[in-house]
Amino acid sequence: MNRRYDVLLCDADDTIFDFGRAEENAFALACEEMGLEATAERLALYSEINLGLWKLLEQGGITQKELRVYRFERFLASIGRGELDADKMSAAFVDALGRQSVPLDGAVAAVERWSRVLPVIIVTNGIAKVQHSRMDASPVKAFISGMVISEEVGAAKPDPKMIEAGMRLAGVTDKRCVLMLGDSLSSDMAAAANAGVDACWFNPKGAKNERGLPIRYTIGSLGEVDALLVGGEEAKK
């Protein structure tokens, strides 16, 4: 069997882990800590605020340290409870999120299969404390060769430094031998494009590539990755 790539760089949230469920659980626990009711409407409001700030982080418009608290400041102000301690809610949420190791269906088995072919490195924009805690509690940990976390690198996807850090961790220097797998156009696929490596877009909802990014593979299920990892030298660029 010939390997087509020498390392698989893999996003964490919504590629391996079910971030929606994890966020919902952590939000409920954080609200309980603050004496708030965790309604579906409040979760949707928080999620919208949080997503917008993570997009701003990708653009370099905010630091992760600022994001952690600001999202709760905005949330509490939006529900008319701005007098509550946003720092306290942030700490409760981060602690709770670190205990949420909910994999997507079939993700653990998929990572195990991939790890038999080549090293799998997690490359994530997540908070270091959260990602280490979640990975330590997950069966996925046994099958990965390491993690690259934006907070520890000092850069966030789509910055190519994240891809380059993953390559160094795997001891790979040839960009033709690197595949980046992820669900986000703005972070994962853009990072791959910026670094000049092949991209595999995990796109189960069939979204459109509105950014026109150079994506080599688009898949609807993690089971499709297996066939992309092997092949002859002619399969490389």
Image: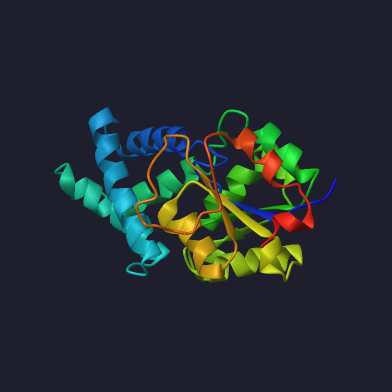
Q: In this view, does 133 lie to the left or right of 75?
A: right
Image vertical order of residue 78 relative to residue 188, above or below:
above
Total numbered labels placed on residues in the image: 0
Q: Which residue is drawn at 37% across and 70% down?
A: 60
Residue 39 visible at all: no
Q: Which residue is drawn at 47% across and 39% down?
A: 19
Q: Which of 94 and 200 is in front in this view?
A: 200
Q: Residue at x 47, y 64 (%)?
A: 158
| Residue 101 at x, y percent in the picture | 57, 37
Q: In this view, does 108 lie to the left or right of 190?
A: right
The colour mode here is rainbow
Q: Quadrant of residue 105?
A: top right
Q: In which quarter of the image is the N terminus?
A: top right
Image vertical order of residue 35 relative to residue 58, above or below:
above
| Residue 139 at x, y percent in the picture | 69, 36
Q: Quadrant of the C terminus?
A: bottom right
